[in-house]
Image: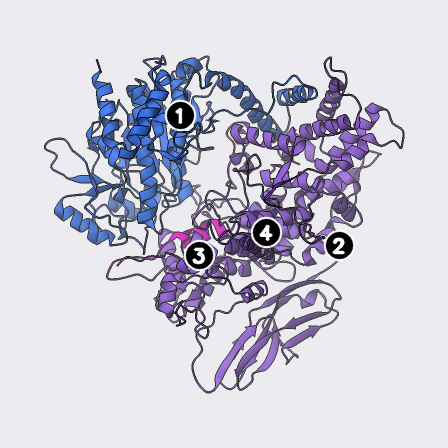
Chain colours: A purple, B blue
Amino acid sequence: MNISLTPFWRRQPQNSSLLTALVTISFSLLGAIPARAQVAPVITVSPISQSVFVGSTVTFTAAATGTPTPTYRWYRNGVSLPAISTTLTLTGVTANDTGNYTMVASNSTNTATSKPAFLNVVTSPSTAIVSFTIGDDGNWEYSPIPTNEALAGRFLIQASFGPSAASVADLLSTSYAGWIDTQLVMPPSFHLPYVRARATEYLNRKSGDDGYQKPRQEAWWQNAIVAPDQLRQRMAFALSQILVISQDSNLDDDNDGVAAYYDILVRNAFGNYRQLLEEVTLSPMMGTYLSMIRNQKPNVTTGQQPDENYAREIMQLFTIGLSQLNLDGSVQLDSGGAPIPTYTQADIVGLAHVFTGWGPYYDPANPPKKDNGTSETSNNWFRYGWDPLRPLTFYTNYGDLQTRTIVGGVTVASTLTGPQRMKLALDTLFNHPNVGPFLARQLIQRFVTSNPTPAYISRVATAFNNNGSGLRGDLGATIRAILVDPEAHRADPLADNQYGKLTEPLLRMSRILRAFPPTPRIYGASGDNRLFLNLLSYPYYMDEQSPLFSPTVFNFFKPGFAKPGAITTAGLVSPEFQIYDDVTAMQESNRNYTLIYSNITVTEPVPTGMTIKLDLSEPLAILTATTPVRTRAEAQAVLVEYFNQRLLGGMMSAFLRQKILDSFTAAATAASNPLTYTSANELKRVQMGLYLVMFSPEFNVQH
Amino acid sequence: MNTRREFIGQATCAGFSLAGMLSTMGTLRLFNASLSAQTIPFDTDFKALICLFQYGGNDGNNLIIPMDASGYAAYATARGAALALPSTNLNALTLPAGDGRSFGLHPSMPRLAGLFNAGKAAAIANVGTLVGPLDKTKYKKGGAGVPPYLFSHSDQQVQWQTSVPDSPLKVGWGGRLADMTQALNTGSQISMNLSLAGENYFQVGNEVFQYPLNTSGSIGLTNYTSTSTPTKQQYAAVQAVVGHSYGHVFEQEYVNVMGRAIGNDTLLKGILDPSKIPLYNEKFVASTTSGLGTANPTLNPVASQLRMILRMIAAQKALGMKRQIYFAAVGGYDTHDNQLTGQAKLLGQLDNGLADFNQAVADLGMANNVTTFTASDFSRTYAGNITGSDHAWGNHHFVTGGAVKGGQIYGNMPDLTLGGPNDTGSRGSWIPGISTDEYSATLAKWFGISPGNMAMVLPNIGRFAQPDLGFML
């Protein structure tokens, strides 16, 4: 009785219509269709969540089938609206229109309810943002906007993949809140379409070679460097470090599926965490990574029990953590002073039973076909089938339907169907009071500082618990709260020698690539702005951090990691130091050396191979400008200040500034081969300054 | 005339090398004859302790398997077809005369069985995290008598590496061991605690900090010693930046790491030059996955770490280190599914890595100076899920080296009855009979800690019956 899971079916060409369905996805957890002359309604298209400004016109569209043809009605937060067609139009929306919208289709046999679409009506632009500077008179001044390039750069280091000339100018024309609000409603840039297109190019060139993991890495860098929806992409990246899957696993060849998983994070980045949790849980990628897919109810004959992997990790890592928390993220203590565990082993066992019976996507009305054209049975498909893109389906034959108890003493009754049991479990976890502070702390750590004050965590957790319109789990409101908070905009960041964070290797690299974007080579049709950058080959391979490639489900570093030494003595945590050590420090410095002084290898065109370079024309122009007239020393000082504003958010120390300028002087006056002022040497001067900036603590530690 | 040690070493190697590789090995041995035959002087009182961590929780129930008829039958029934190993390929362990039991190792570990049967490896049965001796009754009462967050990867990894489950302080017992013995390394620039696998808790000390090594040698800054303009001036500025004091604790730590890396690279590049300390690729033929015979072959993940450790051991005298503590690790042991194939591959890599390494150390004449021990988050449930198993507790581990009193199973094999007296519940998660404290203290004693000082390294050792399990000579 050996069960083989050889995926012979995974190489079959994908149906391109699956791609469209995925992008506009909202899936139903309803059961099978009874075969009768009259047909109960089925929702075929659910409305799509939107974020809009106050005063906009909003249209929701849905569709359903049924015999007789159903009638329709729309609801907001469960309250019916005077809309009776498949389209709902709202004009001049206000904040009161924020909420969950559903369409219900009814006929004589039954009713069906669409998945909810969340409408987020954003007030814009807000002036209730804090940014303090010291005026010339030495007093604190309140200003709601970034007043100079340095402050703009500092915010963009927090909120994007790095400042660029364009994004700095853009931010300077508005406020921090205004920039965020624009980002919240910007259309998402997805990863899967890029991956599919590249895989096709590879396959057209050589059958059987889809480029392996290169297209997915290329998509990530393309969006990080070029995509305008920077905050959404940063949020997806942060979420990918909490809701972790990794291709350093049995997913190593699932390039489409992993890109589709990343798009779940992109699509839901400003949506609702409950929705995100459900899509992640029912993702075939997560199902494979944490072995929930094909998990079966207990077998009384063999004694096999359900796999506990996902039950444990969804609690420990994705929702509530190990210990009961207060709103401010502090750990609750019992009368003996010990932390209070959030769940017991019995809770895990109960939840493991709920997480059974979920297998690869299966539609009984349209089942997958074997090679000989006959239909796959559902039993067969549960055990051997595969669909890397569509959500898991519940298979009644394999799911446990007994009464079970899960965390918080919640009973999952035997009267509930499999999808209902899943819904109850996810609702229970989502509504646990731990979730707000648990997520708040980690998200603050990804964007602003490793050691937020309890008050900061409280404010952000409060926004998660209630976005201001009574909705829990609003990720858009949560990231907004993080980035407009006074603690993100400290006027005196350098005065607190424990504020801030070590940056992440990927974000240091992206900061440079966005500041000095390599010129994309035009390949094929003109207007192709793809960089073909995957940074997977020596010397650019970043083995300490690569997107969706962490060593385990515990991400590249843990939220509570503290580097032994002064950091632990100070009672601080420093997650990013877990991957920063003597080895990675040397590797990264040398990577930077090659990046600055040499070329970057990209994947196209083949077979000649190709290199691109950082575009250092902007700093070079600044250094060599002939108007206004400057001395060499003055020009070099302007260059160094440019680096300060563009790359360091204005945090350059006087010490570093002097050392860079000293190195320019030393090179110009060297006894052997002094660095004269030819245009080639001026470029070397720029490169040397850039290397020293990238080497500096100010570049690596974000304040 | 061969000493007895050399004779056993060669016999072991010849007995277990792959037939097709014999000629290649012979050629390589001839080619590197000058280096292999070169005697590298070493301090006879030198000791190296190597922790080899199996991240994810290795299933010890498929590491040591009952081979007697009724024991195997019960094993096969309880574990089921998806988990039970066939009886035909198990590697029989020769136990001391009169023991009466019959056990075998996983089919992928013939060489470890060979080391065991030659007295160079010992097994420690049913060892795990404990806050005090525990039986089933006491376990069911729960509370402070049971380690917290059992079955959680991250917590059990920390508890194995600190051996103080009931304290939130994350100082490792390897760190405390280095703190206690660092006087033996006076004058050594390099830390006693050397990691081949990045950050870990085992090597966090109160004074001694871990130093990470790359498997391929020391890395320094590109063109660091160049005298050309402007490279020279650039690195002069780098030195100034590294030497500066920063008020911000993260910035200071950043330059601390950078400065130490630069300084240590300069030292190690000199000492580890291949003309002084060979690359030893020819010692790891069975562990080679590609590029056999080339200048830079790829080894399996266990062996690539052990190869670097071997080079650092060979360099101990030049480094001025009388003591070294290593941390190596491999992941992938969390076999919730596809356990039979997954674990077979991992244990095969471990078998070759350990055996090649032990042989190479013996060839240096340093077999008695080097001890390697395995550790892992936990074992896995005796009864599985469909193709794998879940997190459990008490596990079986191995200690290898010339100073090991091998060929025996120390401690008691658990009663392998589901729901039985050693089971926390019904799935076969064994309550440990031996604590990580007793396991570690036995190693620390060999390393040079007296019984009176043992509590400085293993603070909870006083709670347990056997501070010396007796598996070291």
Q: Are marks 1 and 2 in contact (CB under 8 Å)?
A: no
The residues bearing labels 2 and 4 have C-alpha atoms spaced at a distance of 24 Å
Residue at the location (41% across, 52% down)?
Answer: A312
Considering only order in the chain, which callout, 4 or 2, is on the residue closer to the N terminus?
A: 2
Where does the magenta region start and end? A302-318
The residues bearing labels 4 and 3 have C-alpha atoms spaced at a distance of 19 Å
Q: Which residue is mark 2?
A: A126
Considering only order in the chain, which callout, 2 or 3, is on the residue closer to the N terminus?
A: 2
The residues bearing labels 4 and 1 have C-alpha atoms spaced at a distance of 40 Å
Protein chain holding label 1:
B
Q: Are marks 3 and 2 in contact (CB under 8 Å)?
A: no
Task: Give the mark toward the camera: 4 or 1.
Answer: 1
Considering only order in the chain, which callout, 3 or 4, is on the residue closer to the N terminus?
A: 4
Residue at the location (41% across, 26% down)?
Answer: B308
- Classify mark 2: residues with Cα within 10 Å, few (<14), some (14-19) or many (20+): some
Q: Is residue A533 left or right of residue B272?
A: right
Three-letter code, disc 1 = Ile
Residue placed most toward the observer, A561 or A614: A614
Quarter residue A3 falls in:
bottom left
Residue placed most toward the observer, A210 or A155: A210
Q: Which residue is mark 3?
A: A287
The residues bearing labels 3 and 1 have C-alpha atoms spaced at a distance of 38 Å
Give percent across and percent down for residue A549: 51, 45
Q: Which residue is mark 4?
A: A236
Give percent across and percent down for residue A53: 73, 62
Give percent across and percent down for residue B271: 46, 16
Task: Give the mark toward the camera: 1 or 2.
Answer: 1
Q: Are marks 4 and 3 in contact (CB under 8 Å)?
A: no
**Badge 3 element:** helix
Q: Which residue is mark 1?
A: B309
